[in-house]
Image: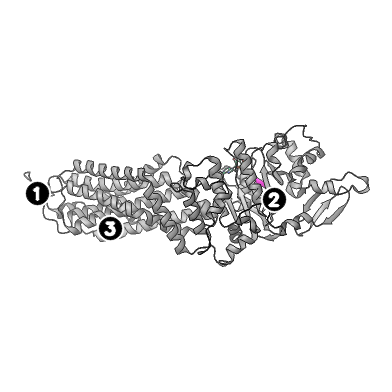
């Protein structure tokens, strides 16, 4: 697939007030041909990653310009299925082995019944001997190769890689670039950003695209770069790495302007082959380059004083080239045709597998990861037992004491706060990292958001519910709340719903914001609900209907009310009184005092369910929004 972009501009809207928009990419042009390994180079902050994100479709908000595939305006949905994006950070599913990760990717990306090519790909990428190693134990280079292997499963014709060599040593970097070169040789278009590569490494790249200050300053064959620099009066010193030199010249804004004007911000493609193969006309030293015209498919050769139309034989050859070098099954067919074979069976679908299959595969993956997270499970178990016992000690044998009205209330509030803090903090801290990984997999068309979200919600339930019931039982029996099956079941049910609401709120925060300081955000997120709960009890009569409604829908308040109604409702007998007078010995008096004597526990549970639904919908919408931009 040949990729082309015209007049691409990428502007970032700063969220701070009165800070102007920042143009990161400024009207650049370029063309990346199939069968080529392309390096996007430039100084730090030049806009390399931004350009890659824009061309790949990973970023769409704030982008203007035309993106084409094989000369046609591209269909984003189709293009997403034919390309893959490998992030700079190696985002791999933790707690799974290399082989398991590959198998999950294959099941998601290939139609049912297709032979899973995990072994061949792992063999090809030198990972077969590490197939039983957990992904988090792999070295940096192995992680990078695994990231590539995962995308090779469905053999897409276009690969985008953001800084694939960052953090790798020289040997591993060379291995990585050689691998990319092999992928390109098979007919794929491989585009990656790279920081100043060594001269020996630069030779592996067929094409270089240099960007500085958001402008294109070179676009063309690697071997034509030195000549181009000399032609504009910036000769690269002998024995100097051209990659280093072109970055060095960008220190001067004058040079950037000059080079960008000379290359027409990427409209011109510099080719060394043409320069060598074309005889000088009229004894003139020719400056030869391709220029892609916006409204024609023809390639033009520009001479200083003449203009010829020319169809690049190399370009045509690449389009039809067959694959040569790899010995595996991948190399036996052109990458595009291999990809077509995989896609043909599901042409009309956005994904290769059905939503139900995706859900089942993802659920199995998540359950496996949860079961392997022994340390996490132990921590959760100890946390629930310890907190249950501590709360139980504080309120030991007290639930039947009619003189302890305020302690009864503290018990109910304490339980709800426990569930809230326990469940809100984890997603706030963990979810931003998970979102990055899911965004990568979702962007690379592994699965849709809906089955992922359904699997995520369901996978956590068994452990969460068990631990909550364990905690509730400890508190219930230590506090000696009179036992009836309905009361105990409702008590556990409320605990579980509050915990699910809190988790939903935590996930909503974690999915929308890239929270770095979750320890502060978690409590901050709870504060408004807590505030509304307190005010909802004390001042609900004195304020407007709207505020009243708002306060009554604080899930903390609903949880506390439901708990009190459960503990003191369901036909509860009067409490024992060991003092002269216990005003609140009769449960009805307490409920009346709290102004909840007319409330129903089932209505509160219904409100809790509604809040849970809203919080989880916000999380889902938040994810969609993050993935769409
Ligand atoms: N979300 C953002 N908000 C504000 N500025 C941004 C954002 N993303 C990128 N930028 C700015 O855009 C410019 C280009 O960033 P980009 O990450 O594309 O550069 P780069 O060439 O890849 O840099 P490096 O090689 O250091 O990773 C930088 O000045 C960066 O600060």
What mark, if any, has residue 438 been given in the picture? none
Horizontal side of 570 relative to 199 (left or right) equals: left
Identify which residue, 617 or 135, lies in the foreground.
135
The residue range painted magenta reads 24-28
On the question of residue 540 being in view, the answer is no
Horizontal side of 449 relative to 458 (left or right) equals: right
Identify which residue, 217 or 172, lies in the foreground.
172
Q: Position of residue 439 (x, y in %)?
A: 51, 52
Above or below residue 366? Residue 241 is: above
Q: Position of residue 327 (x, y in %)?
A: 63, 53
Describe the element under mark 3 as helix, strand or loop: helix
Sequence-wise, the earlier of marks 2 and 1 is: 2
Q: CA distance from mark 3 to mark 2?
A: 63 Å
Q: Quadrant of ligand 1?
A: top right
Q: Quick one: label 2, few (<14), some, or many (20+) residues within 10 Å? A: many
Q: Which residue position is annotated with label 2?
A: 36
Could you tell me which residue is drawn at 71 percent across and 50 percent down?
29
On the question of residue 242 being in view, the answer is yes
Sequence-wise, the earlier of marks 3 and 2 is: 2
Horizontal side of 187 relative to 225 (left or right) equals: left
Could you tell me which residue is drawn at 75 percent across and 32 percent down?
239
Identify which residue, 214 or 129, lies in the foreground.
129
User: Would you say the residues marked 2 and 1 are in contact, meaning their CB atoms lie under 8 Å apart?
Assistant: no
Q: Position of residue 248 (x, y in %)?
A: 70, 34
Foreground: disc 2 or disc 1: 2
Q: Which residue position is annotated with label 3?
A: 604
């Amino acid at each position: 697939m040949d990729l082309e972009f015209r007049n691409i501009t990428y502007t970032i809207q700063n969220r701070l007030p009165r800070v102007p928009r920042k143009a990161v990419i400024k009207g650049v042009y370029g063309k990346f041909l199939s069968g080529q390994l392309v390096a996007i180079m430039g100084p730090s902050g030049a806009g390399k990653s931004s350009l890659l994100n824009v061309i790949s479709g990973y970023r769409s908000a704030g982008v203007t310009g035309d993106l084409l595939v094989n000369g046609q305006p591209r269909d984003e949905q189709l293009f997403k299925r034919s390309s893959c994006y490998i992030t700079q950070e190696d985002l791999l599913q933790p707690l799974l082995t290399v082989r398991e990760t590959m198998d999950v990717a294959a099941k998601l990306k290939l139609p049912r019944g297709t032979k899973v090519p995990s072994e061949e790909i792992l063999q090809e990428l030198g990972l077969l001997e590490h197939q039983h190693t957990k992904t988090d134990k792999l070295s940096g280079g192995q992680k990078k190769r695994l990231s590539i292997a995962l995308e090779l499963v469905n053999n897409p014709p276009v690969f985008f890689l953001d800084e694939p060599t960052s953090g790798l040593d020289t040997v591993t970097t060379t291995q990585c670039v050689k691998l990319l070169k092999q992928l390109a040789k098979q007919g794929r278009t491989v585009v990656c950003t790279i920081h100043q590569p060594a001269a020996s490494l630069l030779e592996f790249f067929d094409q270089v695209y240099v960007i500085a200050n958001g402008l294109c300053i070179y676009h063309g064959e690697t071997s034509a770069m030195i000549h181009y620099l000399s032609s504009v009066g910036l000769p690269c010193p002998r024995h100097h790495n051209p990659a280093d030199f072109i970055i060095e010249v960008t220190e001067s804004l004058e040079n950037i302007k000059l080079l960008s004007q000379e290359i027409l911000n990427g409209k011109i493609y510099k080719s060394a082959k043409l320069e060598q193969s074309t005889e000088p006309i009229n004894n003139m030293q020719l400056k030869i380059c391709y220029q892609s015209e916006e409204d024609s498919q023809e390639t033009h050769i520009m001479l200083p004083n003449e203009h010829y139309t020319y169809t690049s034989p190399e370009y045509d050859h690449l389009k039809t080239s067959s694959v040569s070098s790899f010995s595996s099954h991948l190399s036996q067919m052109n990458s595009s045709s291999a990809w077509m074979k995989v896609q043909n069976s599901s042409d009309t679908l956005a994904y290769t597998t059905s939503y139900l299959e995706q859900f089942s595969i993802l659920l199995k993956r998540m359950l496996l990861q949860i079961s392997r997270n022994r340390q996490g499970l132990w921590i959760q178990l100890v946390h629930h037992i310890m907190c249950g016992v501590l709360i139980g000690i504080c309120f030991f044998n007290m639930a039947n004491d009619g003189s302890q009205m305020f302690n009864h209330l503290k018990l109910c509030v304490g339980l709800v706060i426990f569930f809230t803090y326990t469940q809100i903090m984890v997603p706030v801290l963990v979810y931003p990292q998970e979102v990055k990984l899911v965004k990568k997999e979702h962007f690379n068309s592994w699965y849709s958001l809906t089955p992922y979200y359904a699997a995520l919600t369901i996978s956590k339930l068994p452990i969460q519910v068990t631990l909550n019931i364990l905690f509730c039982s400890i508190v219930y029996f230590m506090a000696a709340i009179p036992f009836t099956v309905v009361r105990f079941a409702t008590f556990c049910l409320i605990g579980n719903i509050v915990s699910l609401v809190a988790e939903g709120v935590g996930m909503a925060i974690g999915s929308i914001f890239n929270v770095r300081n979750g320890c502060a955000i978690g409590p901050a997120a709870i504060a408004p609900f807590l505030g509304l709960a307190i005010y909802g009890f004390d001042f609900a009569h004195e304020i407007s209907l709207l505020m009243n409604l708002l306060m009554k829908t604080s899930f903390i308040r609903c949880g506390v009310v439901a708990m009190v109604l459960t503990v003191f409702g369901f036909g509860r007998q009067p409490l024992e009184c060991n003092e002269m007078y216990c005003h609140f010995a009769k449960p009805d008096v307490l409920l009346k005092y709290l102004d909840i004597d007319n409330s129903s526990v089932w209505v509160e549970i219904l409100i809790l369910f509604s809040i849970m639904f809203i919080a989880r919908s916000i999380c889902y919408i938040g994810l969609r929004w993050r993935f769409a931009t």
